[in-house]
Image (spheres, rainbow, N blue to C red):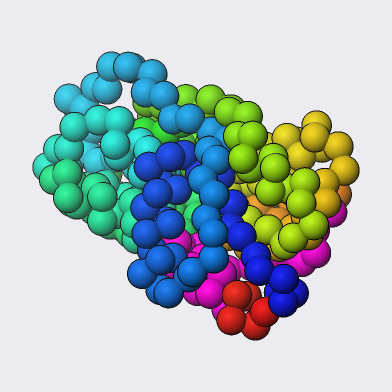
């Protein structure tokens, strides 16, 4: 990072952003942190029928938060999602951070279906269809919506200053939404330093001008925090 003091812009849904800010502070990050969610998580209120399923599939913490826990196996996309599911009473099984890893874990475990994938409106990986094609019947219920939100005026102000801004992005959807909003703002003055959780997230930035894009070593929040602290320490 340049020697000019940097700030961090967190664009995750509010609860996730506040939790991640606490993680950064616990690691000694002292730069200014601006929280400006670009997505709001809204439960759909859909009826979730677990009467004949043998387990569930979670690809995000948001889905875990949307329904009551049950004493059933729950295959989870990553460690943080599994920890939240376990705390609510599910028998959580953690994969390695993305839909492909989750598919591989469920395939290896070879549970008898039917399973129920509880997800948001926007979801990647076609898990239910792929698992069903494999012979593990998997249904879907959409339990939350991701509603886009505009960047705050404070966030826009930072992006229009000639100082570096570090932006961690935790999903391809988030990267796409962030890039779309910045294109609508016109030329920004800040040098963007992006930490992306995956290659797909980096690709979703498209042609957004960035000073640098760094990939986290793993697809998890801890690895994202590690990448951020390394960038700040190198400045």
Residue 51 position, x and y percent, is 17, 25
Give the extent of the magenta segment: 208-230
Q: Is residue 28 above or below residue 188?
A: below
Q: In which image quadrant can residue 48 be found?
A: top left
**Could you tell whether 223 is left or right of 207 in the image?**
left
| The image quarter in which residue 59 lies | top left
Q: Give the residue drawn at x 76%, y 39%.
A: 182
- Residue at point 53% right, 25% down? 147
Magenta-span inclusion, residue 227: yes
Q: Is residue 20 above or below residue 39?
A: below
Along the viewing direction, whichever of 1 and 120 lies nearer the viewer: 1
Q: Position of residue 142 (x, y in %)?
A: 41, 25
Query: Would residue 174 be found to the left or right of residue 33 on screen?
Result: right
Residue displayed at 63% across by 29% down: 150
State the residue in front, 129 or 9.
Answer: 9
Looking at the image, which residue is at 73% across and 35% down?
A: 181
Image quadrant where one finds the N terminus: bottom right
Rendering coords of residue 138 (x, y %)? 38, 35
């Amino acid at each position: 990072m340049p020697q000019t003091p940097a700030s961090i812009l967190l664009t995750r849904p509010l609860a996730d952003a506040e939790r991640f800010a606490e993680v950064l502070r616990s690691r000694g990050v002292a730069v200014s942190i601006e929280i400006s969610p670009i997505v709001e998580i809204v439960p759909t209120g859909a009826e979730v029928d677990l009467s004949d399923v043998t387990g569930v599939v979670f690809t995000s913490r948001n889905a875990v938060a949307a329904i009551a826990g049950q004493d059933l196996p729950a295959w989870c996309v990553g460690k943080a999602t599994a920890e939240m599911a376990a705390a609510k009473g599910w028998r959580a099984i953690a994969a390695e951070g993305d839909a492909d890893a989750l598919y591989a874990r469920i395939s290896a475990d070879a549970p008898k279906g039917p399973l129920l994938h509880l997800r948001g409106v926007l979801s990647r990986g076609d898990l239910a269809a792929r698992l069903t094609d494999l012979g593990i019947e998997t249904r879907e219920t959409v339990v939350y919506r991701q509603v886009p939100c505009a960047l705050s005026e404070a966030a826009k102000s930072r992006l229009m200053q000639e100082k570096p801004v570090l932006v961690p992005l935790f999903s391809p959807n988030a990267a796409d939404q962030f890039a779309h909003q910045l294109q609508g703002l016109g030329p920004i003055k800040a040098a963007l330093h992006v930490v992306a959780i995956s290659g797909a997230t980096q690709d979703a930035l498209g042609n957004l001008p960035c000073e640098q894009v760094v990939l986290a070593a793993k697809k998890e929040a801890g690895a994202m925090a590690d990448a951020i602290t390394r960038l700040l320490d190198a400045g």
